[in-house]
Image: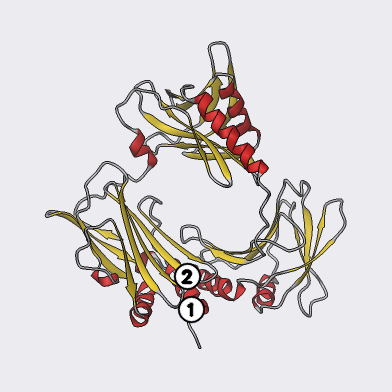
């Protein structure tokens, strides 16, 4: 939460760094990681302002995908992406959102078109207005060579063994909860998931990877003391809520494996059992998330760039992060504990045009009254950590953002705008870190 007498200018976006008055075309570029290869370009208009990012990604798991990100300054209107040259125009795909991602042929087509010397052109149709943005082919040959080397290197690397099946709880923007089993021993590409939303009963679903189960399949779970299996068809167009979902969740939550049978369409049944790894922590976090969403009123949802909370748990720790965007600055506050060491990490970066932060006042969250450095870590003792945990769930802790003598803000870590994530962190800490 940020309070001030002046308006907050939200400029945290890669677009802010692109919108320079430079008419030169940005070259294509390739980025490689251990698991992904990315081919990217910034599309600009006739004035040289780049407001659109185009990415082609290849990974061993998903193969090709293509993504388009438009600046929020552009209208929310239908658009189409084509490849163009002097003698040809080939359609690639169409969309209407500021972010659009598609898997499959489109990404591979963009790669082929660039190799043929064609540039990409995105046209926005808004009423009688028509805006066109192009990529050019500058740097394309070099980027393609690097992209191809990346793909070849990943293909030549032995596939790592998958991690053991483990239950994980997540929330997206504090408006939904999911408890998912990340893998099931004995079958690839199958996931079971519980979900919860605002003021709604819990749901259960099954996701079957269409690349491995093109025609889907049926999962049957055997509930203790119930002769009728709990059945889920992954290809059914409409799934009725099974009134036994709470009973199924209770059986899973009991930490006893539940027997399942998955029958792919046209194949033999596969006998399976649910794992229990991670469930002792993930289920209390899911319960805390679902309980928070049942409140009569929930706080407003701010844009991703203004405020975002993230809670996560790993094998030996719990982590709670608040991300704030303000006047071209990004601030990350993270509380992390492994039960032995409790620390607050502070990071801030200038990410766009705007006012510069002079210092932060962090005395209420374990730091100094005046922090000038952009990166810092502060350790909390057990009592300080316990008190901070409780305050995150209740009223939060304020911190100060000083930009100039006449321009400052008060931010809040936890509290009113973290009514879902803060209880999830508390549930993680209680289940994983508290002794006795």
Give residue 156's quadrant in the image. Answer: top right
**Residue that carries the numbered disc 1 in the rendered image:** 433
Q: Quadrant of the N terminus?
A: bottom left
For the residues bearing labels 2 and 1, Cβ distance under 8 angstroms? yes
Give residue 386's quadrant in the image. Answer: bottom left
Q: Residues within 10 Å of mark 1 (few under 14, many from 20)?
A: some
Give residue 353's quadrant in the image. Answer: top left
Question: Who's the residue at 62% across and 38% down the image?
Answer: 151
Give the image location of residue 2, x and y in percent: 28, 59
Up-down relation of residue 119 to residue 342 (above or below)? above
**Residue that carries the numbered disc 2 in the rendered image:** 318
Q: Is residue 364 left or right of residue 12?
A: left
| Residue that extends furthest to the top in the rendered view of this protein | 87
As drawn, the label of residue 290 is none
Give the image location of residue 34, x and y in percent: 56, 47
Mark sitting earlier along the chain (2/1): 2
Up-down relation of residue 111 to residue 300 (above or below)? above
Question: Who's the residue at 37% across and 81% down the image?
Answer: 382
């Amino acid at each position: 939460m940020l309070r001030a007498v002046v308006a907050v200018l939200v400029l945290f976006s890669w677009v802010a760094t692109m919108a320079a008055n430079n008419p030169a075309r940005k070259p294509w570029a390739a980025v490689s990681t251990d698991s992904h290869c990315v081919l990217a370009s910034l599309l600009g208009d006739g004035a040289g302002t780049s407001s659109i990012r185009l990415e082609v990604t290849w990974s061993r798991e998903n193969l090709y995908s293509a993504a388009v990100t438009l600046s929020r300054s552009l209208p929310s209107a239908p658009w189409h992406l084509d490849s163009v040259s002097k003698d040809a125009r080939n359609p690639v795909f169409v969309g209407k959102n500021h972010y659009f991602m598609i898997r499959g042929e489109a990404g591979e087509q963009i790669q082929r078109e660039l190799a043929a010397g064609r540039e990409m052109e995105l046209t926005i149709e808004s009423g009688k207005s028509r805006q066109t943005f192009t990529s050019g082919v500058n740097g394309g040959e070099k980027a393609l060579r690097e992209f191809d080397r990346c793909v070849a290197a990943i293909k030549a690397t032995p596939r790592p063994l998958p991690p053991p099946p483990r239950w994980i709880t997540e929330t997206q923007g504090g408006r939904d909860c999911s408890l998912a089993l990340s893998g099931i021993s004995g079958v690839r590409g199958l996931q079971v998931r519980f979900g919860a939303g605002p003021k709604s009963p819990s749901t259960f679903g099954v996701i079957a990877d269409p690349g491995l189960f093109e025609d889907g399949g049926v999962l049957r779970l055997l509930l203790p003391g119930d002769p009728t299996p709990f059945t889920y068809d992954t290809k059914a167009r409409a799934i009725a809520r099974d009134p036994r979902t709470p009973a199924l969740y209770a059986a899973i939550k009991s930490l006893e494996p539940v027997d399942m049978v998955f029958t792919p369409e046209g194949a033999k049944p596969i006998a399976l059992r649910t794992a229990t790894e991670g469930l002792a922590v993930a289920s209390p976090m899911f319960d805390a998330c679902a309980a928070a969403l049942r409140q009569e009123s929930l706080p407003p949802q701010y844009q991703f760039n203004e405020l975002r909370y993230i809670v996560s748990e790993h094998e030996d720790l719990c982590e709670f992060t608040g991300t704030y965007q303000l006047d071209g600055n990004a601030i990350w506050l993270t509380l992390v504990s492994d039960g032995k060491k409790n620390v607050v990490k502070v990071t801030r970066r200038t990410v766009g045009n705007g006012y510069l932060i002079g210092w932060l006042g962090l005395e209420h969250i374990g730091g100094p009254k005046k922090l000038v450095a952009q990166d810092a870590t502060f350790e909390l003792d057990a009592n300080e950590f316990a008190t901070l945990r409780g305050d995150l769930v209740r009223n939060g802790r304020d911190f100060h953002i000083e930009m100039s003598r006449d321009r400052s803000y008060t931010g809040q870590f936890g509290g009113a705008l973290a009514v879902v994530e803060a209880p999830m962190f508390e549930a993680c800490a209680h289940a994983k870190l508290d002794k006795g």
